[in-house]
Amino acid sequence: MSAMSQNPAARSEWALITGSTSGIGRETAIGLAQDGYSVIVTGRSKERAAEVRESIEARGGHAVDLLADLSDPSAVRTLIAQVGDTIGDAALEVLVNNAGGGGFAPTEATSEAMFDAAFNTHVKAPYMLVGAFAPAMATRGRGVIINIGSMSTNMAPNGTSAFQASKGAISMLTKSWTAEYGPRGVRVNSVDPGFVITPANEAYREGYGGFVASLPAGRGAAPEEIAEAIRFLVSPRASYIYGVSLTVDGGKSAVVAM
Ligand SMILES: NC(=O)c1ccc[n+]([C@@H]2O[C@H](COP(=O)([O-])OP(=O)(O)OC[C@H]3O[C@@H](n4cnc5c(N)ncnc54)[C@H](OP(=O)(O)O)[C@@H]3O)[C@@H](O)[C@H]2O)c1
């Protein structure tokens, strides 16, 4: 018996959220399941993936968890095949390219391996996933792709050059893919978070104290607040929104200290 037929909540419309074992991706997966999608949870941690899938099931939703290290292109190819096996003839309606995080270092201290991990995870894996799934969306004439960038796409904190460069690349890909797939019914947008209280930046929490206090919002975001922006852009309420980068940063990029 297939996973879909075991669960009455299963729908034929699927959403794949990379990096959904934690933080922003976890809340997005739970939210999109509440919105009625069958959700593919993916990350590297088997335990965290199972926890998110079980959380979705406990709320009456339908989810499948698949593991992949997206810094490894061969693992991305395997994930693409597994997603195909999982959804069968059904449609992948939504792709959220969210997996990633830090690895921050000054340029001279950034190893080739760190650089490659940033670009493989933040750029190459989304590129491969879009190449695999966007054509079918375009053939059907509908689909949504959300790329998770960063507030720092448009600003330059010291000591994060490889991370920022990779986020800058995915921001441009949002526009390139809008040009490519938008005319065939696929909406592609970015969400650029500011400081979000997730495990990714737990190590930086102390150092960000002054930064967070300087925000118009006066606090860091909960991951659910970023997930809400993603869910909106996925929904039909955003039907005329193509190719934007929605900054969700508590006002940081709108103001300047005087
Ligand atoms: N938190 C912030 O303040 C902030 C700000 C700007 C942008 N962002 C962006 O938002 C996205 C989500 O971050 P988060 O704060 O939610 O971080 P998080 O809680 O640490 O979650 C990161 C997720 O990405 C997955 N991931 C990381 N590297 C991966 C890899 N090589 N292969 C597969 N999965 C991988 C993790 O999976 P496992 O744990 O299972 O390995 C986890 O599910 C990232 O792209 C990050 O750059 C976050």
Image: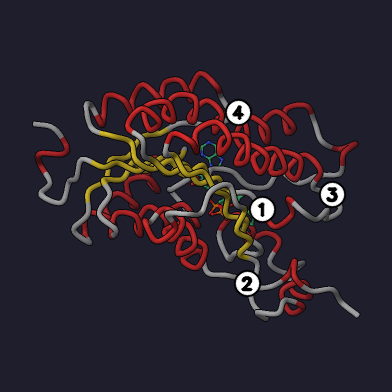
Disc 3 crowd rating (10 Å Cα; few below 14, some 14-19, many 20+) is some
Instruction: Name the residue at 62% across, 53% down.
Output: 245
Answer with mark 1 or mark 2, whichever residue precedes in sequence.
1
Answer with mark 3 or mark 2, whichever residue precedes in sequence.
3
Disc 2 crowd rating (10 Å Cα; few below 14, some 14-19, many 20+) is many
Quadrant of the rendering where the C terminus is positioned: bottom right
Q: Is mark 2 within 8 Å of ligand 1?
A: yes
Residue behind mark 2: 220
Answer with mark 2 or mark 4, whichever residue precedes in sequence.
4
Measured Cα–Cα span from mark 3 to mark 2 = 21 Å
* Pair 3/1: label in front: 1
Instruction: Name the residue at 38% across, 56% down.
Output: 235
| SS category of the residue bearing label 2 | loop
Circles 3 and 2, Cβ within 8 Å, touching? The answer is: no
Residue behind mark 3: 159
- Image height check: is 205 above or below 21? below
Corner quadrant of residue 250: bottom right
Disc 4 crowd rating (10 Å Cα; few below 14, some 14-19, many 20+) is many
Instruction: Name the residue at 39% across, 40% down.
Output: 143
Mark on residue 199?
none
Q: Is mark 1 within 8 Å of ligand 1?
A: yes
Dot 1 amino acid type: Ser
Mark on residue 150?
1
Measured Cα–Cα span from mark 3 to mark 1 = 15 Å
Dot 2 amino acid type: Gly
* Pair 4/3: label in front: 4
Measured Cα–Cα span from mark 1 to mark 2 = 14 Å
Measured Cα–Cα span from mark 4 to mark 3 = 22 Å
Mark on residue 124?
4
Measured Cα–Cα span from mark 2 to mark 4 = 29 Å
